[in-house]
Amino acid sequence: MIDTQLKKAAKFNTTEQKTLKEITEPVSDDLESFRSFYKRALKTDVFLLDQMVRYLLKLKGKQIRPTIVFMSSRLFGNVTERSYTAATMIELLHTATLIHDDVVDEAEKRRGFLSFNKLWKNKASVLMGDFLLSRGLLISIDRDEFGLLKVVSKAVKSMSEAELRQMKAAQLFNMNQERYFKVIKGKTASLFSACCECGAIATSDDETIHEAMSEIGSNLGIAFQIRDDLFDYGTDDVGKPRRNDIKERKITLPLIKAIDNANIKQSYTIRKLMRKRNKTDKEIQQIVEFVRDHDGIRASREQMMKYANRAIEQLNDLPVVDEQRRRDLTDLIEFIITRKK
């Protein structure tokens, strides 16, 4: 169940968690139209690219980011052509970064399917990511949406800087809480911020609202990433354990919190173990138990709730066209921080 503080802040109380399908129902028609819009944006007469695009369209995710764009737009008016443009730009950017990330991480799968780099090798995959980024740029320029382009371009800059910052911290193995939050604010929260701000820009000319929605998205994105990082140390109430971060030697908030709570000898032992490239199942379990025993999960969940609560409080302060639409976005925030995968 969601934290009592969040229920109070959201003025939302339910005995049963809504499904994502139920939560996205208010924008289901918009999402359906978006899929057609997105498909048209990917049209190409280059045979190899066309093959890759067809494969991409099969890899349908949760579409959280387009949903946030549409729900943000609906707070201040009805979804417009500009909303579809914004959602498409952001989805193209997001997908491009995933493809590039898979190349960097040498990943073999994405959403249960073989990754692009596994099927078409690194060079073609990088070029596919570049193609998606270029399509996002052209969509905005063709429609004279320079305001949206500015917001999305700032997100690209923040994401690139954060990725390099994370790589540097990984090389030096000196990730701490301050660096962690700088990384996720740039790498994840910047795109959520762009979703909310672009959604607002599509239906409101009020720059104060644009700034407020940007902040809401940033706080939501931070909460989203902490929830994602908790999955690696998953229990029944956190979700299915993945252990990918541990295997890839990525130090995230649950481990940082646990290390802060441990003594010097314990911290040294775990840091040394995390540096090891090929960990046994027993060693991975040792790290998981260390995080649990030293309050890493609870402390991380507390941080996640803080940012989610902040997003909801900011949302509650905004003038909106319909209270139900405010509740719709609040429901989505609740789903994001309680999801099981």
Image (cartoon, helix red, strand yellow):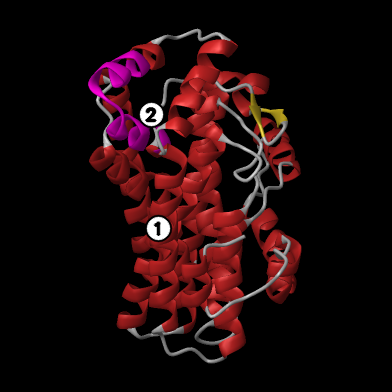
- Which residue is denoted by mark 2 in the rendering? 251
Tell me the chief SS of the magenta region: helix
The N terminus: image quadrant: bottom right
Tell me which residue sits at (70%, 61%) in the image: 20
CB contact under 8 Å: marks 1 and 2: no
Identify the element where label 1 is drawn.
helix
Above or below: residue 263 compared with residue 163: above
- Which residue is denoted by mark 1 in the rendering? 152
Q: Residue 222 versus residue 98: which sits nearer the camera? A: 222
Residue 260 placed where, x, y %? 28, 34
Tell me which residue sits at (45%, 73%) in the image: 312
Tell me which residue sits at (41%, 9%) in the image: 276
Residue 84 placed where, x, y %? 59, 68
Identify the element where label 2 is drawn.
loop
Q: Residue 160 versus residue 328: which sits nearer the camera? A: 328
207 lies left or right of 118: left
**Mark 1 vs 2, N-terminal side:** 1
Q: Do we see residue 7 in this rendering? A: yes
Residue 222 placed where, x, y %? 41, 53
Magenta region, residue range = 254-271
Rounded to the nearest whole Å, what is the CA distance between mark 1 and mark 2? 28 Å
Q: Residues within 10 Å of mark 1 (few under 14, many from 20)?
A: many
Q: Residue 4 versus residue 169: which sits nearer the camera? A: 4
Q: Do we see residue 134 in this rendering? A: no
Tell me which residue sits at (43%, 67%) in the image: 309
Q: Nearer the viewer, mark 1 or mark 2?
A: 2
